[in-house]
Image (cartoon, rainbow, N blue to C red):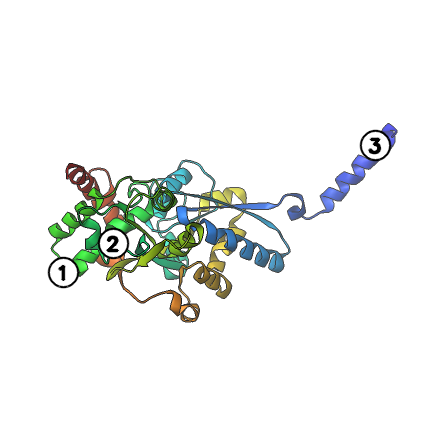
């Protein structure tokens, strides 16, 4: 092709490109940074929301997700991982984005319904088929000879919920605070290894065969049963903790990238009937009363309590129990001496 002809082609291509809408030149990408055991739900949710967004706006979105121990995930965002949205299983792992990173406002939880938590779950106990150790409640996890698999509360929201579930259930049953702490010490003395997140703990219990019981979220149980066969049974304690799963737009990131509109829509859509139904099918407890009624048989009624009710909120619980030198460190030190 002659130079003049090549020049004409280049000019024509450039003119055509300039005439295209911006979305045709560069696909918008959102990153959802989330906790360890939410990956299957958000994989399906991304497909659902992506189709909804394209239908309503005509634009395609590239929706990426990152999963790991919740506290490590949150710290990675504070340290520079450019999450457009963060979706966690407890508020304190989003609070640090405000307190340490100045990435979001302190009142982030007020921006969406239900304190910005579109779904919930509860902590349950998974045992081996036939329940050979006859584990029925939290107190049984502290018996001699019972191995308990729990992820590390320092790095995992799942682990923190387990710790608070056992402690809080004892308090709710009228046990004195010192006795409740002693129970948690006995339980953690029975933990063979503290994995970094819920998925690692599942692998330790189900694949490596360690322990007699795994404490995990109710939403994780059907996935474990499908992946590893029917060798496990779920035990619902007499009382357990309600895990609320909050979400937030990461303001400084979306304003820098120009992705605020799709990021906010991505989170708001979690309250839609379609998304609530999807959550229920992933065994997350929906906020929608209509959807909960539809799937009532999948969610046994159990006495629950929240971190706010028993521990004065996540900030207080974090400071008293999980910060360095807190009660959890004392529990672990005593557990190691048993």
Residue 151 visible at all? yes
Residue at 40 percent across and 49 percent down: it is 37
Q: Position of residue 60 (x, y in %)?
A: 62, 51
Q: How far is the residue under mark 2 from the one under mark 1?
A: 14 Å
SS class of the residue under badge 2?
Answer: helix
Is residue 167 visible to the viewer in this orientation of the structure? no
Q: Earlier in the sequence, mark 3 or mark 1?
A: 3
Mark sitting earlier along the chain (2/1): 2
**Foreground of the two, 226 or 78:** 226
Which corner quadrant of the image does residue 291 belong to? bottom left
Q: Nearer the viewer, mark 3 or mark 1?
A: 1
CA gap, disc 3 and disc 2: 71 Å
Q: Residues within 10 Å of mark 2 (few under 14, many from 20)?
A: many
Query: Label 1: which residue?
Result: 174
Residue 296: x, y in percent?
39, 69
Categorize mark 1 by other alpha carbons within 10 Å: few (<14), some (14-19), many (20+).
Answer: few
Q: Quadrant of residue 137?
A: bottom left
The secondary structure type at the circle numbered 1 is loop
Whole-number angstrom distance, CA of label 3 to CA of label 1: 84 Å
Q: Reading the chain from its start, which is encountered first: label 3 or label 2?
A: 3
In the image, taking residue 46 as reference, residue 73 lies left or right, namely: left
Disc 3 is placed on an element classified as: helix
Instruction: Identify which residue is drawn at 36% across, 52% down.
Output: 107
Q: Quadrant of the N terminus?
A: top right
Residue 6: assigned label: 3
> What residue is disc 2 on?
165
On screen, residue 220 versus residue 27, left or right, reads left
Q: Is residue 203 above or below residue 45?
A: above
Q: Is residue 38 above or below residue 286?
A: above
């Amino acid at each position: 092709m002659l130079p003049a002809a090549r020049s004409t082609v280049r000019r024509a291509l450039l003119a055509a490109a300039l005439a295209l809408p911006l979305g045709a030149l560069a696909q918008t990408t959102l990153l959802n940074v989330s906790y360890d055991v939410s990956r299957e739900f958000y994989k399906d949710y991304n497909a659902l929301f992506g189709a909804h967004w394209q239908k309503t706006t005509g634009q395609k979105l590239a929706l990426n997700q990152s999963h790991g121990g919740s506290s490590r995930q949150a710290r990675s965002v504070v340290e520079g991982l450019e999450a457009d949205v963060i979706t966690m299983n407890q508020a304190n792992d989003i609070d640090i984005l405000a307190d340490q990173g100045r990435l979001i406002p302190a009142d982030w939880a007020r921006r969406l319904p239900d304190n910005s938590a579109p779904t919930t779950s509860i902590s349950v106990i998974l045992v081996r088929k036939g329940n050979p150790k006859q584990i029925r409640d939290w107190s049984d996890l502290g018996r001699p000879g019972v191995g308990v698999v729990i992820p590390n509360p320092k790095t995992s929201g799942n682990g923190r919920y387990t710790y608070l579930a056992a402690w809080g259930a004892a308090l709710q049953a009228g046990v004195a605070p010192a006795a409740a702490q002693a129970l948690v010490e006995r339980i953690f003395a029975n933990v063979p290894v503290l994995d970094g997140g819920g998925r690692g703990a599942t692998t330790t219990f189900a694949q490596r065969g360690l322990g007699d019981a795994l404490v995990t979220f109710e939403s994780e149980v059907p996935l474990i049963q499908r992946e590893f066969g029917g060798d496990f049974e779920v035990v619902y304690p007499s009382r357990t903790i309600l895990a609320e799963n909050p979400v937030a737009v990461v303001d400084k990131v979306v304003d820098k990238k120009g992705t605020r509109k799709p990021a906010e829509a991505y989170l708001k859509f979690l309250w839609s009937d379609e998304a609530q139904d999807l959550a229920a099918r992933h065994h997350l407890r929906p906020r929608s009363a209509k959807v909960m009624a539809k799937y009532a048989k999948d969610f046994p009624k159990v006495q629950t309590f929240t971190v706010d009710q028993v521990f004065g909120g996540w900030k207080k619980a974090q400071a008293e129990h999980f910060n360095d030198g807190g009660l959890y460190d004392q529990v672990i030190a005593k557990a190691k001496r048993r």
